[in-house]
Amino acid sequence: MDVKITFLNCDLEEEIYMEQPEGFTQARHLVCKLHKSLYGLKQSPRAWNQKINALLNNIQFVRNDEDFSVYVAQVGDVKFFIVVYVDDLILVCNNKDKLL
């Protein structure tokens, strides 16, 4: 599955300012303070990783120690795997009915 707006909903830990976008006409001498990450920021991938990690941990997925992009959860005899690659997720399960 593909996460469409991956970097646009992540919180930033530091204060970041940017020049006003082209066409913004209110006051030329002002800058914009970012509250959320944007595509193109160096901080965006890390902010996304922290957000997806917290979300998956919250729903009982555990990050693999050997490969930090792999998460595992087990519910009874059903084992779930999620592989994270930038803004794509691969979902795998040993019970097809539970995955749907």
Image (cartoon, rainbow, N blue to C red):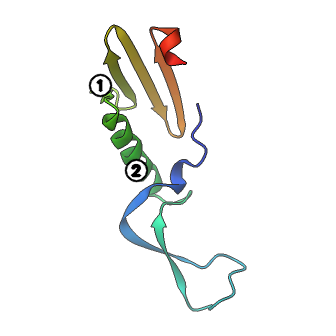
Rendering coords of residue 22 (x, y %): 70, 77
Q: Which residue is mark 2?
A: 46
| Residue at disc 1, secondary structure | loop
Q: Is residue 1 above or below residue 41?
A: above
- What amino acid is at disc 2? Arg
Few, some or many residues within 10 Å of mark 1 (<14, 14–19, 20+): few
Q: Is residue 88 above or below residue 74?
A: below
Give the quadrant of the C terminus: top right
- 25 left or right of 12? right
- 62 left or right of 42? left
Few, some or many residues within 10 Å of mark 2 (<14, 14–19, 20+): some
Front residue of this view, candidates 67 and 32: 32
- What amino acid is at disc 1? Glu
Rendering coords of residue 17 (x, y %): 47, 75
Q: Which residue is mark 1?
A: 66
Front residue of this view, candidates 28 and 66: 28
- 12 left or right of 23? left
* Identity of the residue drawn at 53% across and 83% down: 31
* Identity of the residue drawn at 60% across and 79% down: 20
Residue extending farthest left: 65
Q: Is residue 66 above or below residue 35?
A: above
**Image quadrant in which you'd find residue 11:** bottom left
How far is disc 2 from disc 1 in space, using C-alphas?
19 Å
Q: Is residue 85 above or below residue 97?
A: below
Q: Which mark is residue 94?
A: none
Rendering coords of residue 81 (x, y %): 41, 20
* Identity of the residue drawn at 44% across and 48% down: 48
Front residue of this view, candidates 5 and 77: 77
* Identity of the residue drawn at 72% across and 79% down: 23
The disc, 2 or 1, on the residue closer to the chain's N-terminal end is: 2
| Residue at disc 2, secondary structure | helix
